[in-house]
Amino acid sequence: MRELLGKGKLIAIMKYTIKAAQHAAVQWAEDGLAACQGMDILVAGIGGLFIGLSLAEKLGLPLIQAYLIPFTPTKDFPATVLPQSLPSLGGTFNRLTHHITRQMMWQGFRSADSLARRQVLDLPAAPFNAPYNASPTKGLPVLYGFSSSAIPAPSDWGQDIHVTGYWFLDSEGDWNPPADLINFLQANSAPIYIGFGSMSNRKPQEMADLVLQALSKNGQRAILLSGWGGLQRADLPTSVFMIDSIPHAWLFPRVAAVVHHGGAGTTAAGLRAGVPSMIIPFFGDQPFWGRRVYELGVGPRPIPRQHLTIDNLADAIRTALTDGEKQRRAAALGERIRAEDGLAHAVALIEQSIGNKQSKQI
């Protein structure tokens, strides 16, 4: 999977995932069945939706859909996992891409789902068509964990679909930064952050050299998240600090800009911090977030991983650090996001749904 992620080939990744799901489906159903005992309601996103629906059907429980990326069909934009270079063919085409993508996901998992339903849950196979409107979801809200300041709710989404604001899971305040990191941050002007999360590189040393040379062209200080393969701390110039892991909520407000792969969570953290973001998307929904950051005016145009060079990365860094309008827009967007409480909003909707279900049963 690491090799496939590095290549960014969506179809190959889906094929691998389908095979892995077939091996894991029975275990997922067994673990899920045990975990769901005594529960009142299930909440599931894209990754756990199908097994969640099967468990909900088995146990007679309601299921709330909760997503971190737009997933409900809309005319406003194409499916988020499709190439962002698709031509603009209008609202009908956009809506069709969502239906096709949702059906592809279901067909990819359907054989694994049938196996789990037969061997563990003693249920008949689910229908051929994707079960996104299955009975466990009827009359329940669909929740979206992003800010309406980042993605306004499309006009063709119904009243049962809620953009609640981001769902941040911050630390409890007991994390203490290492002294050498504090010293680095205070030694000079604010550095930038560079990290690609769980994304892998087929040539990590080459990628590390590219990043270091791009930083050198700008004379820019940086904090690198580890995961760079052959790169060791001893190889770094004094202008670069490497760390194994660090809470985004703590670090991002202390840097001048963030460079990352465009995962939904990292993008949210960068936007909340109110600093410009530079997205280097690998695959999946990452190009969508890269394009959205650019359209919001809070970062340079995204650079797909396969097109990344020393020069275009250096140019993107320079733009993020010198474009006053992008910096002002990023700061204003961060202020709006920090004023929201998406988690409390989502919890209130879930509690309201439980109350409504119970009152109808009475």
Image (cartoon, grey):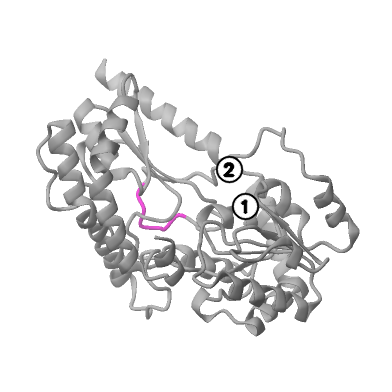
The mark that comes first in sequence, 2 or 1, is 2
Q: Nearer the viewer, residue 227 or 249?
A: 227
Rendered residue at 46%/68% (across/down)? 6
> For the view shown, which residue lies furthest in the left direction?
124
Q: Secondary structure at mark 2?
A: loop
In the rendered structure, the answer to whether residue 189 lies left or right of residue 81 reads: right
Quarter of the figure with the C terminus: top left
Q: Would you say residue 75 sits in the magenta stretch?
A: no
Q: Position of residue 292 (x, y in %)?
A: 53, 66
What residue is disc 2 on? 168
Q: Residue beneath label 1, please?
A: 269
Res 197 → quadrant: bottom right
Q: In the image, residue 252 lies at what x, y percent? A: 71, 54
Q: Are marks 2 and 1 in contact (CB under 8 Å)?
A: yes
* Image position of 178 with respect to 309: above or below: above
Question: Residue 136 lies in what quarter of the image?
Answer: top left
What amino acid is at disc 1? Ala
Q: Main secondary structure of the magenta part?
A: loop
Q: Start and end of the magenta stretch?
A: 153-158
